[in-house]
């Protein structure tokens, strides 16, 4: 297909869509996205490179403009809630979109559904995924339907369930679904398949089953995840644990609410493996990698610089100071974000957080930071001995007490990576943005990627202390910036 083709991506704020859009742009395609609320795209670094249309699958008239002039549309919209009507809602949405696409002469729809033998006793969720594909094909538009099982990638709800259960539970009570066979696929391979379909005419009007190189049980997936993370885990079979009880267990052990966990777990009773080699025939250039490789790549995203920031940045950019503190679990990372409006220029705010640490000390409870440094030295860490290279300037790679400067963006951002001993990985980030009336928005974010149960206990036990210190720190930085009469500087010319 010509790279000048117009590609529409629905569900661009979701897990797959949010990763697909930049890949399409890199490949040179002209991309349009359809979302219910355009504000949810704020902070995406590709948002200004695409056409953005707002629409609702349940309001057919709102879809007409979005599909006009489109050559191929990705349909990446589906529900997964523990309710009686989500199946009907999925079908209605697919029919509405299919009718709009047919009316606009869209050449093809590419849809991502779920693996599972159609004649088997599929869960309501898996049955809905397959019938959604059928509803799209009945519109009269050519459809390429991919069917996949668990997607291994940071942010995939199925993978996040495996991640959190394995990280938090040294011994896991395992219901029957833990021993169901599944063929997981890495997110990178999945994106390769659905993008390659654009250049593969023979993939039109096909149902294509895709999976990774391994067929495993969910229990084996948990144990292999533990091995990659360097954790020891024990599985204890409890065959009487029902899907509903399992969903409550997942609800309490992971960030996944029971309303989503229930249909997800109900689908885990079905064996979902690839039954033919059509994908290999159509896309011989794609070499699916094994589960361990997929897990390793997902764990590489345990880095503050790789966090998808749009959902939290949108709070800062669109809501001003309406939510001063946000604590969330996201892709294996605990994120604690604070923000405040500062009656000072961006340069002055940047100046203040660039001077933290070293001989000047930390803005709030400096004694507590030094006490943490002493503890770190006692347990074999770097402690506070290193100070900082320069009292006012920082550059990437500098040591700053028991932190390392990981990123500096002049007049905007400073990110520090912790080098003290902690059960996981930690970062502290400051960034400042212009606000109305010559004011600035200061955002302070702590990231923590816990390792194992002790990592989670460490975070939650110390959270009251961290909350006190981080709240006081952003308050002091605000006060210092507003009282600052120094000449502003940037970090562009370093001594």
Image (tube, rainbow, N blue to C red):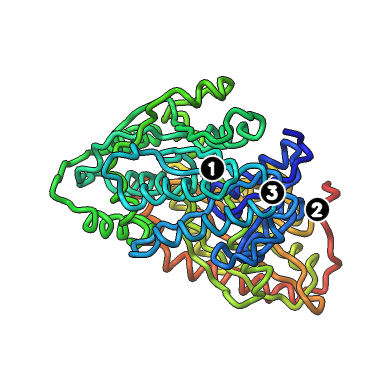
Q: Nearer the viewer, mark 2 or mark 1?
A: 1
- Please tell me which of labels 3 and 1 falls first in the chain: 3
Residue 133: x and y in percent read 48, 46
Residue labelled with disc 2: 491
Does residue 315 sit above or below 383 in this rendering?
below
- Closer to the camera: disc 3 or disc 2? 3
Left/right of residue 29 with respect to residue 457 in the rendered view: right
Query: In this picture, is 333 found above or below 226?
Result: below
- For the point 75% across and 62% down, which residue is it? 350
Q: Which one is nearer the viewer's eye here, 154 or 182?
A: 182
CB atoms at circles 2 and 1 under 8 Å apart?
no
CA–CA distance in space, label 3 to label 2? 53 Å
Residue at the image point whose x is 84% and y is 60% from the top: 489
Q: Mark 1 points at which residue?
A: 301
- Spatial distance from mark 3 to mark 1, Cα to Cα? 39 Å
Q: In which quarter of the image is residue 88?
A: bottom left
Secondary structure at badge 3 equals: loop
Asked whether, in this view, residue 352 is left or right of residue 215, the answer is right
- Circle 2 — which element? loop
Q: Do the residues labelled 3 and 2 touch (CB within 8 Å)?
A: no
Q: Nearer the viewer, mark 3 or mark 1?
A: 3
Between residues 225 and 161, which one lies in front from this camera angle?
161
Q: Mark 3 points at which residue?
A: 105
């Amino acid at each position: 297909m010509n790279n000048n083709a117009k590609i529409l991506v629905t569900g661009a704020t979701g897990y797959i869509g949010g990763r697909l859009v930049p890949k399409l742009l890199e490949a040179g395609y002209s991309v349009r996205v359809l979302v219910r609320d355009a504000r949810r795209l704020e902070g995406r670094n590709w948002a200004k490179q695409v056409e953005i249309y707002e629409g609702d699958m349940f309001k057919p008239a709102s879809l007409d403009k979005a599909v006009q002039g489109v050559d191929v549309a990705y349909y990446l919209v589906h529900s997964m809630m523990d309710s009686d009507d989500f199946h009907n809602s999925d079908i209605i949405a697919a029919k509405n979109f299919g009718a709009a696409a047919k009316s606009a002469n869209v050449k093809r729809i590419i849809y991502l559904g779920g693996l599972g033998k159609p004649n088997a006793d599929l869960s309501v969720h898996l049955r809905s995924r397959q019938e959604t594909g059928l509803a799209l094909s009945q519109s009269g538009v050519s459809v390429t339907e991919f069917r996949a099982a668990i997607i291994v990638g940071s942010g995939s709800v199925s993978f996040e369930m495996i991640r959190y259960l394995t990280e938090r539970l040294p011994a896991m009570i395992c219901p029957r679904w833990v021993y169901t066979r599944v063929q997981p696929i890495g997110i990178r391979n999945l994106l390769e398949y659905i993008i390659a379909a654009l250049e593969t005419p023979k993939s039109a009007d096909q149902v294509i089953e895709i999976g990774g190189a391994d067929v495993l049980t969910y229990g084996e997936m948990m144990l292999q995840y533990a091995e990659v993370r360097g954790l020891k885990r024990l599985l204890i079979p409890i065959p009487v644990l029902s899907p509903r009880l399992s969903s409550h267990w997942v609800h309490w052990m992971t960030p996944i609410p029971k309303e989503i966990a229930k249909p997800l777990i109900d689908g885990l009773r079905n064996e979902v493996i690839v039954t033919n080699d059509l994908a290999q025939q159509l896309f011989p250039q794609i070499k699916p990698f094994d589960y361990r490789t997929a897990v390793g790549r997902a764990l590489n995203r345990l880095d503050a610089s790789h966090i998808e920031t749009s959902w939290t940045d949108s709070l800062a950019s669109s809501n001003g100071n309406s939510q001063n503190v946000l604590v969330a679990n996201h892709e294996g990372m605990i994120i604690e974000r604070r923000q405040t409006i500062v009656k000072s220029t961006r340069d002055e705010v940047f100046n203040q957080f660039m001077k933290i640490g070293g001989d000047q000390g930390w803005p709030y409870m400096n004694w507590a930071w030094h006490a943490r440094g002493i503890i770190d030295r006692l347990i074999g860490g770097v402690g506070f001995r290193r100070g900082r290279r320069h009292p006012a300037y920082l550059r990437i790679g500098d040591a700053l007490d028991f932190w390392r400067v990981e990123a500096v963006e002049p007049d905007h951002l400073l990110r520090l990576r912790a080098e003290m001993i902690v059960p996981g990985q930690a970062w502290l980030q400051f960034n400042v943005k212009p606000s109305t009336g010559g004011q600035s928005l200061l955002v302070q974010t702590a990231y923590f990627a816990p390792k194992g149960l002790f990592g989670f206990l460490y975070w939650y036990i110390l959270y009251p202390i961290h909350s006190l210190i981080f709240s006081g720190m952003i308050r002091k930085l605000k006060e210092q910036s507003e009282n600052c009469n120094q000449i502003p500087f940037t970090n562009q010319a370093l001594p």
